Amino acid sequence: MNQQIDSQTAARLAAHLDRARPMICERVSAKMMLAFPELAATLQLESAPSLEQRLSKVATERFCEMLRAILVFEAFELADQELRWAHPIIVRQGVTYQHQATMVRWVFEEVRRLPLDAAEKNLVYELEQYLNNLVRTIFQPAGS
């Protein structure tokens, strides 16, 4: 899919994401742990004092960095590479389509709370739609 990204809009949105990343990751990780306590079994506590912080480190921060990379490099296809690479690993750890799709939805809910102009809001919408479709495609069973 060849998505055209306006450079100036992408740069502004990337800056917003960079500033808001800690807040977004904290909120989404806390919501994920409440909604999906089964994820606790897959999280190792060795490098974080709480499950929420560990989830933030291994999932939400990485996802936000991927979004920022898409914007900086103006390349939606970075998400394809990242998510397709991660898919077999996260599935082995018990991550399901529901977990991944919920994280995408909640990250974008937080992003939409940022003070965005109309062009940035449109780009956020395009990114969200693209990533929802990609996650659905990646998690879709073969032959479906």
Image (cartoon, rainbow, N blue to C red):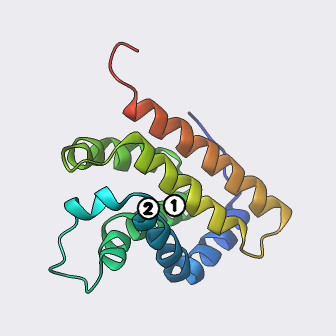
Q: Residue furthest left?
A: 46
Q: Residue at x 29, y 43 (%)?
A: 87
* Viewport quadrant of the N terminus: top right
* Mark 1 surroundings: few (<14), some (14-19) or many (≥20) residues within 10 A: many
> Does residue 104 lie above or below 22 as drawn?
above
* Mark 2 surroundings: few (<14), some (14-19) or many (≥20) residues within 10 A: many
Q: What's the amino acid at mark 1?
A: Leu
Mark whose residue sits in front, 1 or 2: 2
Between 22 and 127, the one lying in front of the other is 22
Label of residue 63 in the image:
2
Residue at the spot of label 1: 67
Between 14 and 136, the one lying in front of the other is 136
Q: Quadrant of residue 12?
A: bottom right
Q: What's the amino acid at mark 2?
A: Phe
Where is residue 84? Give x, y as percent. Answer: 33, 41
> In the image, 122: left or right of 94?
right
> In the image, 80: left or right of 19?
left
Q: Residue at x 34, y 69 (%)?
A: 55
- Residues at badges 1 and 2 in contact (C-beta under 8 Å)? yes
Q: Residue at x 62, y 50 (%)?
A: 127
Q: Residue at x 85, y 62 (%)?
A: 118
